[in-house]
Amino acid sequence: MMDISNLWAALEMRYPRSLSCPWDNDGLMVCADPHREVKRVMFALDATEETIAEAIACGADVLITHHPMLFRPLKNLHPFSVSGSRTLSAVGGGLAVMSFHTRLDAADGGVNDALAEKIGLTDMEKFGDEESPELGRIGTLPESMTAEEFAAMVRDTLGTPSVKLTGTQSVSRVAVVGGAGKGFIGAAMDAGADTLLTGEVDYNTVLDAASERFNVVEAGHYYTEAPVLPVLADVVRELCGAECFFADSNRTRQI
């Protein structure tokens, strides 16, 4: 077993702040007692009110998320704001919260490696833009598919209710960027991809991509990032032997 401060140090070594985008605020969000022993850890994509309450209820010492619990600076601390309420709930419950955002996107074994592996890509390489040159991943399918076949495979593999497909090109070389991948379409094209798999892109951007004979598959922000959670849990088990739990923070529903 190890305490919270040592677990944080070990995870920060594995997922260093140097990989984070300059605008990001990932890291150790809340920690009232750094010397508390880590026995139980909850994993979720987001530190919502519900996931914080669920973590406290199951006796977790740490909640590890992808999206930062505190993205903007706190100007005050009271229960009448979302950030204030979450912070007070975590501190009151003795829960430390760690968030690994863009550093986890870019890191080896992170969000995009997990997504690429989930859909069966091989011959993987890193790609990105000027700000994050190694954030995305690009790889090859075992065999070429039609755009419709690839989109259906992604839907079934990720367990998302539906995907949005724009483009009609045959799919062989796929770039993946979990979450919001709008800014990486040009870099994916330059890297030799015929398709980008991401969570969400705006309407006009995907239309422009299709005009350049490039496919975009949007499988949902949550579903393209959630595959990393079991990977994170394996890392934590290896580090400290903690009991691991998962919470579903996805609030989006199809009606």
Image (tube, grey):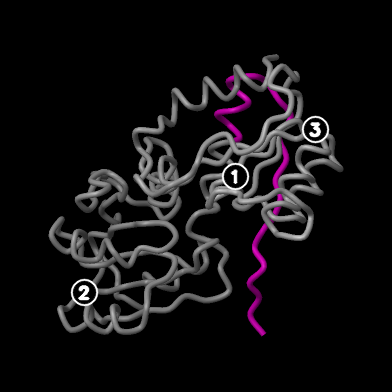
Quick check: 51 above or below 197? above
Q: Residue shown at 75%/53% (left/top)?
A: 85
Q: Quadrant of the C terminus?
A: bottom right
Residue 220 location (% of width, % of height): 50, 68
- Crowdedness of circle 3 by 10 Å Cα count: few (<14), some, many (20+)? some
Q: Residue shown at 67%/50% (left/top)?
A: 76
Q: Earlier in the sequence, mark 3 or mark 2?
A: 3
Per the rendering, the mark at residue 65 is 1
Q: Nearer the viewer, mark 2 or mark 1?
A: 1
Circle 3 residue: 94
Place residue 215 in its image quadrant: bottom left
Q: CA distance from mark 1 to mark 3?
A: 17 Å
Q: Earlier in the sequence, mark 2 or mark 1?
A: 1
Q: CA distance from mark 2 to mark 1?
A: 32 Å
* Region in magenta: 233-255
The amino acid type, in three-letter code, at marker 2 is Phe
